[in-house]
């Protein structure tokens, strides 16, 4: 009888362990001293974890050229934040490869010594934002929750979670958390031609968007600071190429000689972005550093 009871208890304990392994668990904080940047990830069992980023990109604000106005706005807002002054959530929008995410990462390097930390969250995991905010609520550091290449489709659960965190949630975001997001489109949700039919016109000529359009605009408006990025001109592109080549140790004479090749490189890729300039500089500096065979 006793042996039978023990077997039943053992089976019950194993069953409870299996149930607990699939139930949602409270998000635990990582070793905050392990890095200045962290990444939120979902495991195979659906549990989220905050992992330190072992190798943080060492990009600096001085590395980013031809975006001085945007740099000034983000740098000022981030400085206010780390100093404990009022600051805004930020939406960086515009042309691809113009330095949106690089600027956020450069600000991390600039203000890490002042207590700034970054938590990167994929848009598919934004539904867990409230848990992340709770974990850092009592920490002395200042946290930027960063979501790169943000956009949503209709019905995406992350849309409402982010909207709730930015504004209107019963549980407000603490004073040590800001949301920085980048996107190629300002309104974050796809817009369709048929939605223009929902606009209404008043007798005095005023135009009012319909409910669907208002809903799509409302999320962007919850970001207090909008920073727009634009495609680079040819001269701006070449200036960025020169800056990156110089950072790789290429001489002035070789930088000047590389201009035609840099233009061909951009033409082949159909873009004069900062990313394309950086990729060309790496290719040129690397190939010219190799000994001739």
Image: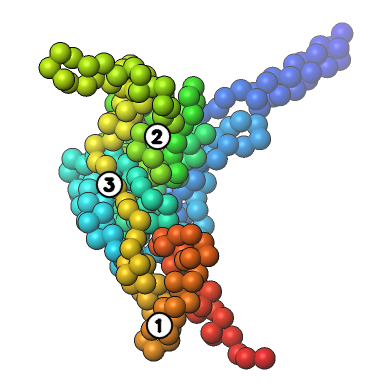
| Mark 1 vs 3, N-terminal side | 3
| Total marks in image | 3
Marks 2 and 1, how far apart at CA: 39 Å
Q: Is residue 79 visible?
A: no
Horizontal side of 130 relative to 82 (left or right) equals right
Q: Which mark is residue 286?
A: none
Q: Residue at x 86, y 15 (%)?
A: 3
Query: Mark 3 or mark 2, which is nearer the start of the sequence?
Result: 2
Percent across and percent down for residue 40 are: 50, 41
Residue 225 in the figure: left or right of residue 95: left
Labels 2 and 1: the sequence-earlier one: 2
Q: In the rendered view, does 241 fall on the left or right side of 157?
A: left
Disc 1 secondary structure class: helix
Look at the numbered discs 2 and 1 and tell me whether their residues touch, using CB distance below 8 Å.
no
Which label sits on residue 188? 2
Q: Which residue is mark 3?
A: 227
Residue 9 image-quadrant placement: top right
- What residue lies at 36% left-to-right and 26% top-to-bottom? 216
The quadrant in which residue 272 appears is bottom left
Residue name at image x 75 percent, y 16 percent = 12
Q: Residue, x 47% and y 66% (percent of image)?
A: 266
Mark 3 surroundings within 10 Å by alpha-carbon count, few (fewer than 14), some (14 through 19), many (20 or more): some
């Amino acid at each position: 009888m006793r042996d039978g009871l023990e077997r039943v208890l053992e089976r019950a304990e194993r069953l409870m362990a299996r149930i607990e392994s699939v139930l949602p668990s409270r998000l635990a904080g990582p070793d905050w001293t392990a890095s200045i940047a962290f990444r939120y990830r979902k495991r195979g069992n659906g549990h989220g974890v905050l992992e330190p980023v072992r190798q943080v990109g060492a990009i600096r604000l001085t590395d980013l050229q031809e975006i001085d106005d945007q740099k000034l706005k983000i740098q000022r807002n981030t400085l206010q934040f780390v100093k404990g002054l009022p600051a805004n959530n930020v939406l960086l929008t515009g042309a691809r490869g113009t330095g949106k995410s690089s600027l956020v990462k450069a600000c991390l390097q600039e203000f890490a010594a002042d207590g700034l930390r970054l938590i990167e969250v994929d848009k598919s995991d934004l539904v867990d934002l409230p848990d992340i905010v709770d974990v850092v609520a009592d920490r002395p550091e200042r946290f930027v929750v960063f979501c790169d290449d943000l956009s949503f489709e209709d019905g995406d659960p992350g849309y409402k979670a982010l909207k709730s965190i930015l504004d209107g949630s019963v549980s407000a975001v603490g004073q040590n958390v800001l949301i920085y997001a980048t996107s190629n489109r300002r309104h974050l949700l796809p817009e369709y031609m048929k939605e223009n039919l929902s606009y209404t016109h008043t007798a005095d000529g005023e135009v009012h968007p319909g409910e669907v359009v208002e809903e799509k605009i409302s999320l962007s408006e919850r970001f207090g600071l909008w920073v727009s990025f634009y495609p680079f001109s040819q001269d701006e592109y070449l200036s960025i190429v020169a800056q990156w080549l110089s950072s790789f140790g290429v001489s002035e004479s070789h930088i000047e000689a590389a201009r035609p090749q840099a233009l061909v490189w951009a033409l082949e890729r159909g873009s004069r972005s900062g990313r394309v300039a950086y990729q060309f500089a790496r290719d040129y500096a690397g190939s010219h550093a190799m000994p001739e065979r």
